[in-house]
Image (cartoon, rainbow, N blue to C red):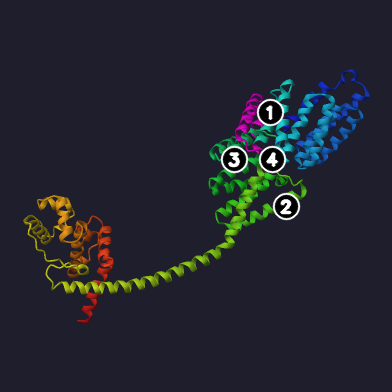
Amino acid sequence: MITLYPFINTRYFFCIIVVFFSCTTSIFSQENNELQEAFSLVDKGFDLYSSEDYDVGMQFYDQALKISKELKNDSLVSIIHTLKGHIHLRNGKNKDALQEYTKGLEFAEFTEHEELEVKANAGLIVILRRMNRSEKALNIALRSLEIIPKTNMYRKGAHVSILVLSSEVYLAREEYDSTLFYVEKALEISKELSYKEAILDLYIKKGMVYYHKKQYNASLDYLLKAKDILTTQEISNKAFPIINTTYYTASCYYEQGLYDKAIPILEDGINNFEETDFFKPPAIRAHLLLANCYNEKKDYEKGSFWQNKYMELNEAYQKDKDQTIDIIHEKETNQLEQKITDLENDQRQAKTRLFIFLFIISLALIILTYGYIKKQKSNNVVFQNLMQEINQLESINKQTVVKGLTKKEIFIDDQKIKEIIKGIEKLETQEYFLKSDCNLRTMAKKLKTNTTYLSQTINQYKEKSFTEYINDLRINYVLKRLQEDTKFRSYAIQSIATEIGYKSSYSLVKHFKAKTGINPSFYIKSLNKQETASEIKV
């Protein structure tokens, strides 16, 4: 956003001219009449500048410049070159603007008037910033801020403009704390002066800073303040403030994922832009942002429409202008364009990805089906073997059910050990192992011995650890009961687990599979299947 209004205010120019030009001694002279004519031409040029009639305004400035050079009035020549630079700057002709500002600065040095130097410097700062020469732009801005306290510009509109331009350089350099420092200084003076144009611009600047700092709610607060000023107060040159407020407000909503809020703001803004606004970079980027919003909503038809509009405007802009974009927006525009490209690539690759996905799913289903069938066959073999074992064990007294583990006949002389073993067998008969609190400590207490002695006895005479011993008893029990008790088979796995002393279904499944090689659910289904087949045969 270019903030040079105080430097091109007509009344301000006349004040400067009265101070700088020694006209009082020849107030009725021919020279003075020619000078007054130059002033009048400058005034007309400024009015046309304000109405954005740049070509005709430039003609008046050229006529005034010719008179000023004939009068050898270096001060007025400096001012007119600076004004011409402002027109080129606003019209997007950056190289021509740079040339005019340089000439204005040269003539200002001839006069040794520091105020004229500051005026020309203001335009140079903008051009250098656009040309990505931020270091030089910053040096000129700081030099101007050193000069201003020595002039009658101090704490006036011109002072505000240099502060704002300094903030813009820092903004382009992405040094946001420094940007805010100069914005706050400018805002303080602007409020003293009731300088509403500057206050509007500074609120937008703060909105931009907080947007780039990703503090979107803070950004929206200042952008809404700017919008309130635009709505309720008479502001000259509203075009850029309206466009920037629209663009950054929508950008905040976009970054927050609030596309339905961003879209109407952008569409309303674009519909109300003047014809000349469409060649301003923020207005062009508004089309790109709108395309991006629709693409994020997967409305690719509208996204494509607005993207094409953006491309048309941007191409026209690049042809007519110096192909120079504000540095602060260049990276942002590239990011938005990259998002558009990424979304287009996603669309092109969607069918391929879907095909690959379906192929992988189909292949996985085939593999899983094959694995399942193979596993089922394996489980059926295990089940049949298991059933044979169980049936064989029915004729053997006190044999364990799983994997042919038969109790050894024990000959013990130690009376104490005999009593412990007898007690263990009694607890087996009582099915104490089905209790959830059955553990080494509680069993030792029941057998009136200690845990160490009980553990060693089971290890020696049962040939397994206490935990293995209890788990074997429980699994043997559940295998037999499931085979014989149809109602028990209808229980949920968790209920079966609780019934035989486990606290969770996971424990039952783990130990069941470890001992048998199949899951309890498969065992139950196989039993039911076998039973149904038997009924059909009968």
Image x and y of residue 392, in percent: 17, 74
- At x 76%, y 31%, the residue is 121
- First in sequence, mark 2 or 1: give its number: 1
- Dot 1 crowding, Cα within 10 Å, few <14, some 14–19, many 20+: many
Confirm whether the magenta stretch covers residue 57: no
Alpha carbon distance from label 4 to label 2: 21 Å
Q: Quadrant of residue 216?
A: top right
Q: Quadrant of the N terminus?
A: top right
Q: Mark 2 or mark 3, which is nearer to you?
A: 3
Near-viewer residue (185 or 253): 185
Give the residue pinned by disc 4.
239
Q: CA distance from mark 4 to mark 1?
A: 20 Å
The first of marks 4 and 2 along the sequence is: 4
Sequence-earlier tag: 1 or 3: 1
Residue 212 numbered mark, or none? 3
Q: Residue furthest front?
A: 413
The CA distance from mark 4 to mark 3 is: 22 Å
What amino acid is labelled 1 in the image? Val
* Mark sitting on residue 315: 2
Q: Position of residue 173 (x, y in %)?
A: 65, 38
Q: Residue at x 7, y 55 (%)?
A: 416
